[in-house]
Amino acid sequence: MAKKSKKIKDKQRAKYKAKIKEKQSKEKEVKEVKEEDVLYICTECGVKEYIPRDVVEIFDEIDDENIIEPPTYSCEKCGAIMRPKKYEGVHGITYEL
């Protein structure tokens, strides 16, 4: 009986350790979101993605011809356009969904 009880406990420990390992790996995968990151939302599927502000500003400066529209990106999931939820551009214009 003692062997059976030990095997059960070993299995429970192994499951517990696996859960902890899985949780730790997920935490590493999740990008640390900074306050200055800009939240982009897909106009089709609604996927949300944080893009570093400095990257958004670079694209905003590059596209000087059309300052009416904010910098947009393609959704990795469905390919549609992603727009910022709220972003104050380098030209002083605030874009909101």
Image: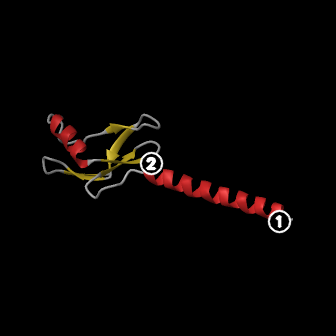
| Cα separation between marks 1 and 2 | 41 Å
Question: Number of labelled discs?
Answer: 2
Instruction: Determine the image quadrant of residue 3.
Output: bottom right
Residue at screen point 66% across, 56% down: 14
As displayed, is residue 18 above or below residue 60?
A: below
- In this picture the colour scheme is secondary structure
**Which of 16/60 is in front?**
16
Residue 88: % across, % down: 20, 52
What amino acid type is highlighted by mark number 2?
A: Glu
Q: Which residue is denoted by mark 1 in the rendering?
A: 2
* Among numbered discs 1 and 2, the one appearing first in the sequence: 1
Q: Which residue is denoted by mark 2 in the rendering?
A: 29
Q: Residues within 10 Å of mark 1 (few under 14, many from 20)?
A: few
Residue at screen point 24% across, 52% down: 87
Position of the N terminus, as image quadrant, is bottom right
Direction front: furthest residue: 2
Helix, strand or loop at label 2? It is helix
**Which of 68/24 is in front?**
24
Instruction: Determine the image quadrant of residue 15.
Output: bottom right
Residue 21: % across, % down: 55, 54
